[in-house]
Image (cartoon, rainbow, N blue to C red):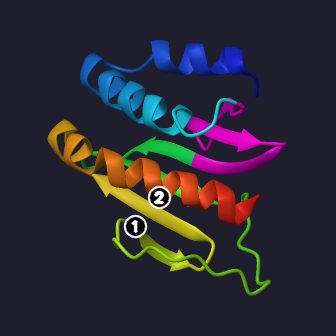
Amino acid sequence: MTPDDVAVWLAAQDGPNRRRIDRLRALVRSVKAQWVETIKWNAPSFALKGEDRVTLGVERRGGWRLVLHRGAAVRGDGFAFEDPARLARWPSPDRGVVQLRDLAELDSRSTALVDLVRRWVEATA
């Protein structure tokens, strides 16, 4: 997938989903200028040095998600990450999922989410 695929994917999104995803994309991009954005798992995904770190998505039942990860497969290497604000659900030590219901929730959590993504990038560098 290429960055051009992102434009194609975004063009296919309806107005409300597009606005939400654009806001999440801006939040993630504010953390690192060096992100390479592509489409992975049918959603915008952000990588650094060829390693996927953050993937966005639209939830089937409404809302959207931000997934923190270290690639497609869970690694059993003892990695640990602290989420003291408990913003994410952690199905494994190296995979966190933040679910957001609406723009008001995104706005109220944006500072904490930027901090979470920044710390995630630092911890997984």
26 sits to left or right of 53:
left
Q: Which residues are magenta?
A: 34-54
Q: Amino acid at mark 2?
A: Leu
Tag 1 secondary structure: loop
Residue 51 forms part of the magenta stretch: yes
Residue 4 lies, with reference to residue 21, above or below; the image says above
Which of 55/8 is in front? 55
Q: Amino acid at mark 1?
A: Ala
57 sits to left or right of 69:
left
Residue in the picture at 34% in, 47% down: 111
Residue 62 lies, with reference to residue 16, above or below; the image says below
- The circle drawn on residue 112 is none
The residue wearing badge 2 is 116
Tell me which secondary structure the magenta stretch mostly adopts: strand
Res 99 → quadrant: bottom left
The residue wearing badge 1 is 88
Foreground: disc 1 or disc 2? 2
Q: Are marks 1 and 2 in contact (CB under 8 Å)?
A: yes
